[in-house]
Amino acid sequence: KNQVEQSPQSLIILEGKNCTLQCNYTVSPFSNLRWYKQDTGRGPVSLTIMTFSENTKSNGRYTATLDADTKQSSLHITASQLSDSASYICVVSDGRIKAAGNKLTFGGGTRVLVKP
Amino acid sequence: DSGVTQTPKHLITATGQRVTLRCSPRSGDLSVYWYQQSLDQGLQFLIQYYNGEERAKGNILERFSAQQFPDLHSELNLSSLELGDSALYFCASSEGGAGETQYFGPGTRLLVL
């Protein structure tokens, strides 16, 4: 069964500090992995997307890494800001043919709280 | 702004009632997805439509149904509502049928009393 596990479940950091979120997956075959940011009560917004051949992708202060061999990804937030307080969701897509429909597996998310 | 619109923003209703949530995808997107997010829970995939046809089904209850119209907007119908159906319902759209980035709408917050 395809699964995506995220850790930690929640995290509190001080403004200006860095943090790293983890995502482990057992989705097979693998197509791509996304990180989404979801502010409370709002729809998720895509931060990064990585395919099998990519092992790092940046979007401003967000840097995602992917190790397809160990089936792990991380999202690193640099110099955190108060606006980074949100849930971060790891989503993995399997590699079936495009016509097969939605094949995304969602992680449970990591809730990040940035304190001043 | 993702380009995906959802109406209404908020909905309060009573148990046993039926409601309809509406979603307009981004211009050019053929796929529409519906998700449920209960309080402090992760996103639960309900159903996907691609160009008017049901493409994939997730954890959607029999009391729930959806459709996608020729103009590609979609409606999610929730009937015989129960207290546990109170949640945020998100619609997302993508260009094709599988694996692409999904763009999420602002959600409809449903409260069943």
Image: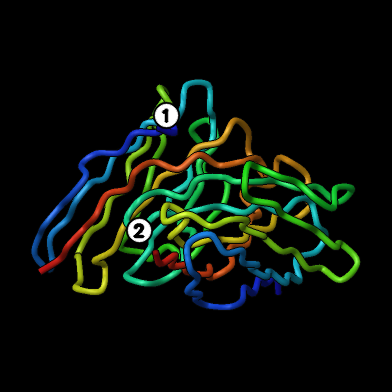
Distance from the alpha carbon under mark 2 to that under mark 1:
19 Å
Q: Secondary structure at mark 1?
A: loop
Question: Callout 1: residue from which chain?
Answer: B
Q: Chain of mark 2?
A: A
Q: Is residue A9 above or below residue B94?
A: below
Q: Nearer the viewer, residue A8 or B23?
A: A8
| Residue nearest the observer in this picture, B57 or B27 | B27
Residue type at mark 2: give it.
Thr
Q: From the viewer's perspective, is B84 left or right of B59?
A: left
Tell me the tag on residue A40: 2
Residue B61, quarter of the rendered image: bottom left
Q: Do marks 2 and 1 share a chain?
A: no
Q: Residue sitting at 10 percent across and 69 percent down? A: B113
| Residue of label 1 | B3
Kind of residue sitting beneath label 1: Gly
Q: Quadrant of the N terminus of chain A?
A: bottom right
Residue B33's x, y, as percent?
48, 46
**How far from the left and from the top, in percent, is residue A54?**
85, 48
Residue A11 image label: none
Q: Residue at horizontal 63%, vertical 50%?
A: A62
- Who is closer to the viewer here, A2 or B19? A2
Residue B69 x %, y % = 39, 30
